[in-house]
Image: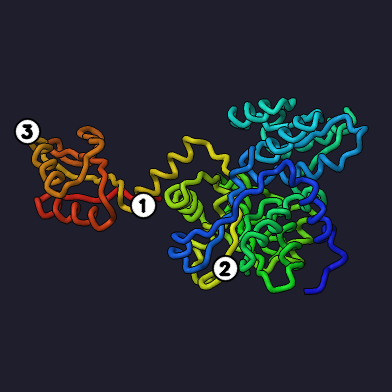
Amino acid sequence: MASIPDLPVSIDDIRAAHARIAPAIVRTPTLISKTLSELTGATVYLKFENHQFTAAYKERGALNTLLQLPGTTKGVIAASAGNHAQGLAYHADRLGIPATIVMPTTTPIVKITQTEGHRANVILFGETFDDAYAHARQLEQERGLTFVHPFDDQRIIAGQGTTAIEMLQDAPDINCFVTPIGGGGLISGMAVVARAAGRPIEMVGVQAELFPSMHNRVTHGTLPCGGETLAEGIAVKAPGTLTGRMVETLVDEIMLVSERSLEKAVSLLVQIEKTVVEGAGAAGLAALIQHPDRFRGRTVGLVLCGGNIDTRLLANVLVRDLARSGRLARVQIRLQDQPGALFKLASVFDAERVNIMEVYHQRIFTSLPAKGLITEIECETRERAHLERLLDAVRAAGYEASLIELA
């Protein structure tokens, strides 16, 4: 495809960025996943950007920007509660450049601590990102600092695009990139590389259904934007001016994925690849899971763009996936309030070789007669078919039983 000269970032910019940052960035592996390929019907290559020092690709753009600042710079400032903050703080500290990061007061303490661990000056201001952003721009003027935008900057876009250069060097048969979109910096840079490859490489962007901001821009849609998403790293309400223009020009399609698909993708990456990825980093795989026919037969490159997920949230995601797959279940059963009732019921579980983990008795707050009770048993089975055999056996023994399903 011919070059598009009026775009703000060129392939030469990205190649120069790659040469500039290569000595201080982990060249993360791009590896084929045979199991995910079998599951999705596509040939799936994964780039493990969660192996960067701060566990996210954001280091690339941050470092590319820092290395181009004039020597007279007093310091840098950014508004971020996520990976941009840590990437900028880490490399600024390494280069001896003072860094100030403005975060909303609602930022989890672990992210504050991690950013301060890179010797950045963290300022908590406002309850939302917009509040923090406005305050950072104010401090930029008052203190004479250099503001580093998380995505809407040519240097940031060029740095993020270096991921695609490495992927095509390591897996030259990739013919489709499926890339998460928040503000659009990563996909903008990758799309420039794809268009300069000298052969057709499809660019597909992915957003969470709850935050379809770039999708709305490209399709002129009005889908609502907001809510609690697992992919908070791409929960951006307004895409960038530069990135919006580049995505409209270079990206073939933007897909939306559900929260359930995001949870499944995070869980699969832990189970199959033994790697921890945050919700935003799993969005590409979520698209393959939710829309397998769209990618069947393609050779797909996915960037696992970040691994910074709260451990408690990760545990919750993994347990919920066990429940959805039938390996963990809560069964509600009606019993008679008589001696030995629970013992007799437990014998059915024993006969089916189902492990009982928790038992909850409810005598008072039920709609049953006084001599009736509801018991809920949390149990562990081998798979969905094993769970169905248990339910059949419980009902065959004369009990009313139902499965408590997850949303």
User: Judging from the image, what secondary structure is the residue with disc 3 in?
Assistant: loop
Give the Cα separation between the discs numbered 1 and 2: 29 Å
The residue under the point 45% across, 49% down is 267
Q: Which residue is mark 1?
A: 324
In depth, the one of 72 and 53 nearer the eye is 53
Q: Which residue is mark 3?
A: 339
Can residue 347 be seen in the rendering of this structure?
A: yes
Amino acid type, label 2:
Thr
Q: In the drawing, does residue 37 fall left or right of residue 395?
A: right
Point out the image quarter for the N terminus: bottom right
The residue under the point 54% across, 46% down is 277
Q: In the drawing, does residue 31 fall left or right of residue 147?
A: left
Can residue 305 be seen in the rendering of this structure?
A: no
In depth, the one of 336 and 96 nearer the eye is 96
Residue 231 appears at what percent x and percent y? 57, 47
Q: Earlier in the sequence, mark 3 or mark 1?
A: 1
Local crowd size for mark 2, using a 10 Å CA cut-off: few (<14), some (14–19), many (≥20): many
The color scheme shown is: rainbow
Label disc, if present, on residue 299 of the rendered structure:
2
Is 102 located above or below residue 200 in the figure?
above
